[in-house]
Image (cartoon, rainbow, N blue to C red):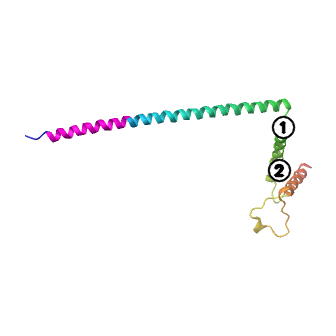
Amino acid sequence: MTNRAPRHSAMVDFMQYSKRETVVLEEDHLKVEKELARVTAQRDAILLQAQTWACEAKAQRSIVHEVGDILGGIPSWGPIAAGVEALRKDAGRYRALREMNWCHGPLAVVADPYSRIKLGSDCPSRDRLDEAIDAAMVQEVKP
């Protein structure tokens, strides 16, 4: 006859261990559910704030467009209007320079100027470049 006491003791030990592990797993599960709820609430709050900001931005754009329509263009808001006009002028210069080429245009952009441009070449920059582009644009408009 076999001794059942060690088997029984091992089964009891396993059942007690299993109960302890079940309690630990349940506690871990509760912690995970709690953290998930916290993260979900945080995500929802962030999404709500983003939606609020999007609505505010849309309303502000709508107001700016309405004021612009009433005033017949960009509102004369001092520095803002002057800044927008300067950006438009720079964009026009860039587009004009972009269309010029080295064989037909009065100006051209040169890559690697240190090795390709010779001493004495005129290489306007900053305000002089703006003036040169403006002059070339005026010449281009004349027939």
Say which residue appears at 83% left-offset and 40% top-offset. Answer: 81
As drawn, the label of residue 77 is: 1
Residue under label 2, please give it. 93
Q: Decide: few, some or many residues near mark 2? Use Cα within 10 Å; few <14, some 14-19, many ≥20.
A: many
Of the 4 image quadrants, the one containing the N terminus is top left
Q: Amino acid at mark 2?
A: Arg
Work out which residue is located at the far bottom of the displayed protein and give it.
119
Q: Position of residue 104 (x, y in %)?
A: 84, 57
Amino acid on which the number 1 mark rests in the picture: Trp
Q: Where's residue 126, x and y in %?
A: 83, 56
- Taking the magenta stretch, the answer to whether it contains residue 15 is yes
Question: Under tag 2, what secondary structure?
Answer: helix
Q: Nearer the viewer, residue 116 or 30?
A: 30
Which segment did they paint magenta? Answer: 5-26
Mark 1 is surrounded, within 10 Å at the Cα level, by few (under 14), some (14 to 19) or many (20 or more) other residues, namely few
Camera-near label (1 vs 2) is: 1
- At a point 81% along the width and 53% down the height, the residue shown is 97
Quick one: label 1 or label 2, which is nearer the N terminus? 1
Front residue (pair 57, 45): 45
